[in-house]
Image (cartoon, helix red, strand yellow):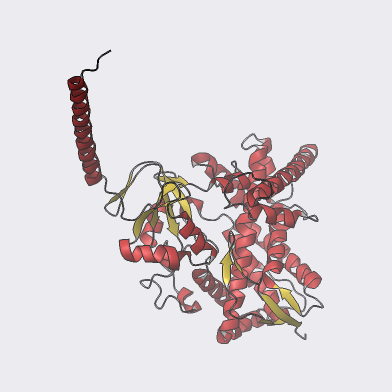
Amino acid sequence: MAVDMSFVLSLVISLIVISMIMCFFRKNKTISTKSKNKLPPGEMGLPWIGETFEFYKAQRNNQLYEAFVQPRSRTYGNIFKTRLMGSPTVVVSGAEANKFFLSNEFKLVVSSWPSASVQLMGANCIMEKQGDHHRLVRRVIASSLNCTSHETLVSKICSSVEFHLDTNWHGRDTISLFRSTKMLTFTIVFECLLGIKVETGMFEMFERVLEGVFALPVGIPGSNFSRAKKARLQIQKMLLNIVRKKKKEMEESHEGGEDGVLLSRLVTSLTRGEITEEEVVDNAVLLVFAVHDTTSFAIVMVCRMLAHHPRCYAQLLQEHREILDSKETNEPLTLEDTKRMKYTWQVARESMRLFPPIFGSFRKATVDIDYEGFTIPKGWKVLWTTYGSHYDSQYFSDPLRFDPSRFEDPLPPYVYVPFGGGPRVCAGYQLAKLNILIFLHFMVTKYNWSLIYPDEPITVDPLPFPYHGMPIKISPKMS
């Protein structure tokens, strides 16, 4: 069949014209959309990968703010776009950003964690729940951490701390402070809060899970995520057996279980049909990770700051000596005693300002959000950081200087956010506070101690920790 070249030429020209017209309208539509919905400035980087490698590198070196956020903020301002872990992401900084995004949880944004974190923490924990069901489960958890439960918790924590020091510190001249406090806070969450006895191997199982929470969710045998997933299944099986046993005991005794013990309260909600077995297990797992690792890091950073600032240490020690002097020999600490540890808590808060246990967290826009003259499209991630306000000279003069007196007066809301804020503020905040105060009381009154590596670097994998585990020299104080 003969080919009509004039027809072919006309067809090609027509296609070119149509393409040019389509491009023109697409371009004009894009310009119109952008003028109406102006995206924040910034670089998206490579497709899918974006700036993920730069983000991870900065995080691992504990330089997420200094090496990743701050340079971009200097160029673009306190709101900029990037692409992290496959998702277009807007990074925001400052107290106003904290307030806007944290207080608008469930309205404009929802919690959005990486896939690996969700799989390992559990898809049925409050981290993933929204709205009324989130509030229901949160109330159950908070009921074991309210004011009426604090006195009982203080007594239990004191017993755990004293037993830990007698078992793991007595007769030794050096210890790894970070590992020691991790084991202690792990035990406190399980035994004092949940009412579950810690058995051999449990700590190691949870440590394996932690190694994979920010890993690529690829089940390659031998990978961090694969090992973590295997350990998570072991934990699931173990906790399910404990939950079912507890449920049977409570049903047979027709009692509500031990007052103030979180597992009893969760199982009570289970028997009422308010939550499922999976929710009981997943929330127990989440609480362990939310409290024990972050609290142990906070404790070792307090000790680091005290070692570097002897005058602060002397003032803190005096506070605890006065508490001891006001009590009879071997008289236990009370909740009122912890309320007298005001300077100690100022020291702890200033340490957590400089070394926050978490760098921030991710949210996902559920609608198009207008903020600071820009539009954050629905489905995009939002990352807020603790450093953005903690290092802000508007609120903290000479922000890199250690100064506990900053916390003598109240701060504006959402400036200081080591435990987050809004509807998702850390449910274990009060437990962490009691852990820190009580441990420091026994440590400084019972032991002389000093850092072996005064300037030990801090690294992140996946949460921050001292590179050498913060070994310290210890010797018991004479009574």
**Viewer-proximal residue among 423 and 271:** 423
Q: Up-down: is 456 above or below 87?
A: below
Q: Is residue 302 left or right of residue 16?
A: right
| Quadrant of the image containing the N terminus | top left
Q: Up-down: is 88 above or below 164?
A: above
Task: Say which quarter of the image contains residue 467.
Answer: bottom right
Q: Is residue 112 left or right of residue 372?
A: right
**Viewer-proximal residue among 94 and 17:** 17
Q: Which residue lies at the image location 60% right of the left edge and 76% below the top edge?
A: 456
**Viewer-proximal residue among 332 and 110:** 110
Task: Say which quarter of the image contains residue 191.
Answer: bottom right
Can you see residue 105? Answer: no
Residue 382 placement (x, y as % from top left): 41, 51
Can you see residue 13? Answer: yes
Q: Up-down: is 217 above or below 476?
A: above
User: Residue lying furthest front in this view?
Assistant: 2
Q: Is residue 337 left or right of residue 195?
A: left
Residue 402 placement (x, y as % from top left): 49, 78
User: Residue lying furthest top in this view?
Assistant: 1
**Viewer-proximal residue among 206 and 146:** 206
Residue 83 placement (x, y as % from top left): 41, 51
Task: Say which quarter of the image contains residue 310.
Answer: bottom right
Q: Which residue lies at the image location 71% right of the left edge and 68% below the top edge?
A: 180
| Quadrant of the image containing the C terminus | bottom right
Residue 468 placement (x, y as % from top left): 65, 72
Mark count: 0
